[in-house]
Image (cartoon, rainbow, N blue to C red):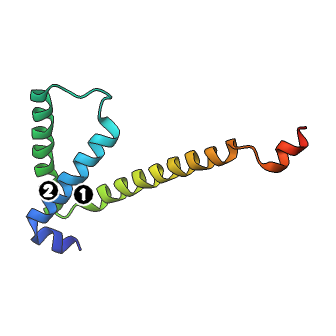
Amino acid sequence: MQAWLSDHKLVSYLLILGFTIYIFNKVFRAQQRLPLLKEILVYALIAFGSFILMILQVDKLPIIQCMGIAVLMMLMLRGRQLYDKWKGVKEAEPSPQKAESGK
């Protein structure tokens, strides 16, 4: 896989760019939106940094694999948060047995 990614530089760059934007938006994004020029600057710097990471990927460092694991872990955390929220709603509803015993 590493050799294939090294041979296909555009695919490597797009994967790194996508992972980087996803991680930035989920972890480092402020609650408020930035002004337009600052947004453009941030994404331009992300694109430049992704190019540097692509060079490291071509030099046989597992950048895409590491970022993929980070995104997978973030998705697992989000799934767990949704599951806990869903279970919290179910447990907050009084069951018929508990409602009868309280009378």
- What is the distance, in whole Å, between disc 2 and disc 1 at their CAs? 8 Å
Identity of the residue drawn at 15% across and 32% down: 39
- Vertical placement of residue 62 versus 79, above or below: below
Amino acid under label 2?
Answer: Met
Residue visible at 38% across and 57% down in the picture:
72
Q: Which mark is residue 63?
A: 1
Q: Amino acid at mark 1?
A: Ile
State left or right for residue 52 relative to residue 69: left
Figure quadrant of the N terminus:
bottom left
**Residue appearing at x 11%, y 56% in the figure:** 55
Q: Residue at x 45, y 49 (%)?
A: 78
- Asked if the residue at tag 1 contacts the one at tag 2, i.e. Cβ–Cβ closer than 8 Å, the answer is yes
Residue 71 is left or right of residue 96, and the answer is left
**Image quadrant for the C terminus?**
top right
Q: Residues within 10 Å of mark 1 (few under 14, many from 20)?
A: some
- For the residue labelled by badge 2, is the local secondary structure a helix, a strand or a loop? helix
| Residue marked by disc 2 | 54
* Residue 27 or residue 88, whichever sits in front: 88
Q: Give how far across and how far down residue 90 sits, in percent.
A: 65, 48
Residue 102 vs residue 9, the one in the foreground: 102
Image location (x, y in percent) of residue 51: 10, 51
